[in-house]
Image: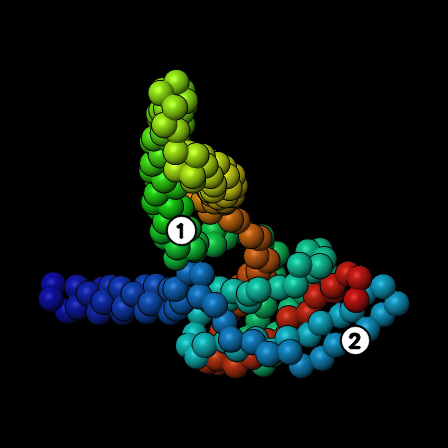
Amino acid sequence: MWKRTLPFAVAGLIALGLIAASRMTAKPEAASAGEVAASKLVAVTVYPNSALITREVEVPPGNGFVELTVTPLPSTTLNGSLYTEGTEGIRVLTTRFRSRAILEDTREDVRKLQDELKQLQFSREKLEAEVKAMVANTMTVTKMEGFLQVTTVQSTEKGNLNSESAIALAKHIRESRLEQAREQVDLMQKIQANQERSEFGQRKLKELSSGVARTERDAIIAVERTNGGGTVRLNYLVDSA
């Protein structure tokens, strides 16, 4: 009984070993998804309206399948022109074109613009405070003018008008009004310029806060390695060369 079952048990163990070995050898060695492969330009063939670009792409060492990303490709790349040449021990499975939107990092620009807008707001508040002070000064000058008129009338009626004092006060009032008018015009111009810069900054901040997208173009190459790593050659056409 023992002699009959022994060959079957040995055969079963051998079969299990073969199945396990086949599963282990069939499982490919994969690289991390989206890995960017190093590449360099090795040839350019120029045609009347286009050019053929050839890049040598490094394949990392190992066995099994791996997906390589070559980026960025020129913006004028013809996506239907991509093809890859394999080498000994590296078989190219597919080569495809991919375009993706990249959001530029503008946080530093946003921070600087926010600081600038704060400074503009402080400047505006200071200018508005100066305008209020000027209005108060104008009211004071108006009171002085009214006082001069009343004093002149009373002094004239009494016959003791001091003409030099009246002329000096009138001159002071006139110069004060001219100076205040110039200052008021200057302040209003500064406030207008401040407002324009603030509005421009707000529009720019809105654009930066929403992000600026750019499009990058990649070549995705799937290869199978049977003898370790090496290199493959990626070829593509660019328009308007």
Q: Mark 2 points at which residue?
A: 45
| Count of picture labels | 2
What x and y, as percent, mark residue 227? 48, 80
What x and y, as percent, mark residue 83? 67, 65
Query: Residue, x 47% and y 51% (percent of image)?
Result: 103
Mark 1 belongs to which amino acid? Glu
Query: Residue, x 80% and y 62% (percent of image)?
Result: 240
Residue density around tag 1, few if under 14, some if 14–19, many if 20 or more, within 10 Å:
some
Mark 2 belongs to which amino acid? Thr
Q: How far apart, in angstroms, are the residues tagged by discs 1 and 2?
A: 50 Å
Q: In this view, does 11 lie to the left or right of 149?
A: left
The answer to whether residue 146 of the structure is visible from this angle is: no
Query: Residue, x 56% and y 52% (percent of image)?
Result: 214
Q: Quadrant of the N terminus?
A: bottom left
Q: Mark 1 points at which residue?
A: 116
Q: Which one is nearer the viewer's eye here, 224 or 200?
A: 200
Q: Is residue 38 above or below residue 198?
A: below
